[in-house]
Amino acid sequence: MSDKVPYKIYLEESEMPKAWYNMRADMKNKPAPLLNPGTGAPMKAEELEGVFCKELVAQELNNDDPWIEIPDEIRSFYRMYRPSPLVRAYCLEEKLGTPAKIYYKFEGNNTSGSHKLNSAIAQAYYAKKQGLKGVTTETGAGQWGTALSMACAYFGLDCKVYMVKVSYEQKPFRREVMRTYGASVTPSPSETTEIGKKILSEHPGTTGSLGCAISEAVEVAVGTEGYRYVLGSVLNQVLLHQSVIGLETKAALDKYGIKADMIIGCAGGGSNLGGLIAPFMGEKLRGEADYEIIAVEPASCPSFTRGTYAYDFCDTGKVCPLAKMYTLGCDFIPAPNHAGGLRYHGMSSTLSQLYADGYMKAVSVPQTSVFEAAEFFARTEGILPAPESSHAIRVAIDEAKKCKETGEEKNIVFGLTGTGYFDMVAYEKYHDGKMDDYIPTDEELKESLAKLPRI
């Protein structure tokens, strides 16, 4: 072990970010605007304010301000669990026999178990500030629903969660954590909404998707006085809040004079990846530094690597605005894999634009390979990782092995978005040899993409 870099690099509380970083301000090609599905015109703030909190709409549409101050109330809450540690993976390096230096930003050291709390507390704060009674949302694996239920309890807001049915059944304990914090949790699609009934009639027996759950949550928010809808990923506002991850990561590296060569993050809707890469991408956009940035997605839901860059609905029920993104089609229902947080048909419009412009790469990996890496990491580094995070672990290990072959001493940084202690059904299936690697066929994707709206 080097005497210069400790196992865990901690920032002082005073070094915690005072403002979120907005990547869009430094992008020459701005993300395409959200479109009204009825008129095809860019969505206006007043139209979005019927669904989202007013201040969050302002953040969503802000393409100009690079820094947005974090309110004191949010920073006060952050202090409960931030700054989070940047860990030098000495044990993993030794086990792999690689000359690469591996670092991971660990976001699982809060009760919600993931990075999702960074945006949940911000969105709950703005809802409370607006005088709302409560919020509605969707959740995949349950990390976002758990984080939002905690945030709503803190501010005294009601929280209605629509949880993707397959995750509702696979992760009952995550559901109970949400209920412990006062949230109501409904498996989606459900019979409690008109959109849910429609989806069930068209896809009987479906295991659900994030797109389905979004539709139900939006319907309830729009139809209930004093409520707004909040989203755990995809949107610009969420990537903005999650920039605290990357800002802390870069500050910790700078503290020891370390420059990252490669930054790796799992990618579903884009919140974790966008937050992790934010300040590094900013330097890349401004021409100040260069980094190799890799998005890792499941082979069962490969929006970057096999999707189409086009306008699409953000939800299966087609009630949300149209976003230009890499998409598999809003009607695409992913296989019921165990990385529930990555089972979204599309990708953040900001990350999609950056990917289209060549600022980052993307790879997809099969499920059993991901769990093989997760188990190896757990045995080596002593943390049981979430299935979502394990996609980044898989590629970080693969890249470190390449360095062993070439002798390159790269600094590899990846995001460990959370822990997997509520994902034991998934680990059980992997250990019992009952996990498969379903990958959609070209015909399936073609059928789904053929239904894209004509813009």
Image (spheres, rainbow, N blue to C red):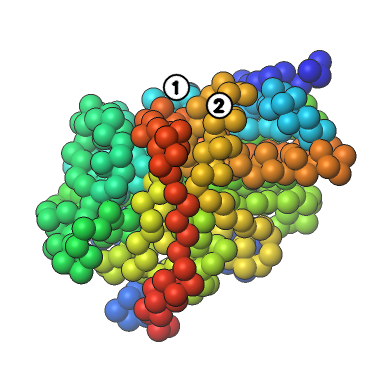
Please say if 117 is above or below 453.
Answer: above
Location of residue 153 in the rendering, given as x and y in whole percent from the top left corner: 26, 30
User: Which circle's residue, 1 or 2, is located before the other in the chain?
Assistant: 1
Q: Nearer the viewer, residue 257 or 201?
A: 201
Location of residue 169 in the rendering, given as x and y in whole percent from the top left corner: 26, 41
Judge left or right: residue 151 versus residue 22: left
Judge left or right: residue 26 versus residue 50: right
Instruction: Decide: few, some or many residues near mark 2? Use Cα within 10 Å; few <14, some 14-19, many ≥20.
Output: few
Residue 50 is drawn in which quadrant? bottom left
Q: Nearer the viewer, mark 1 or mark 2?
A: 2
* Residue 14 seen by the camera: no
Tell me the element at label 2: helix
Q: Nearer the viewer, residue 424 or 420?
A: 424
Q: Residue at x 19, y 62 (%)?
A: 204
Residue 35 is drawn in which quadrant? bottom left
Q: Which residue lies under the disc numbered 1?
A: 80
Tell me the element at label 1: loop
Q: Exactly how many numbered labels are in the figure?
A: 2
Instruction: Decide: few, some or many residues near mark 1? Use Cα within 10 Å; few <14, some 14-19, many ≥20.
Output: few
Q: Residue furthest bottom?
A: 454
Q: Which residue lies under the disc numbered 2?
A: 378
Location of residue 23 in the rendering, given as x and y in whole percent from the top left corner: 60, 54
- Which quarter of the image is occupied by the C terminus? bottom left
Q: Residue at x 40, y 49 (%)?
A: 337
Mark 2 and mark 1 in contact (Cβ < 8 Å)? no
Q: Which mark is residue 288?
A: none
Q: Residue at x 68, y 51 (%)?
A: 293
CA gap between label 1 and label 2 equals 26 Å
Judge left or right: residue 399 versus residue 278: right
Q: Residue at x 81, y 38 (%)?
A: 404
Q: Residue furthest top?
A: 3
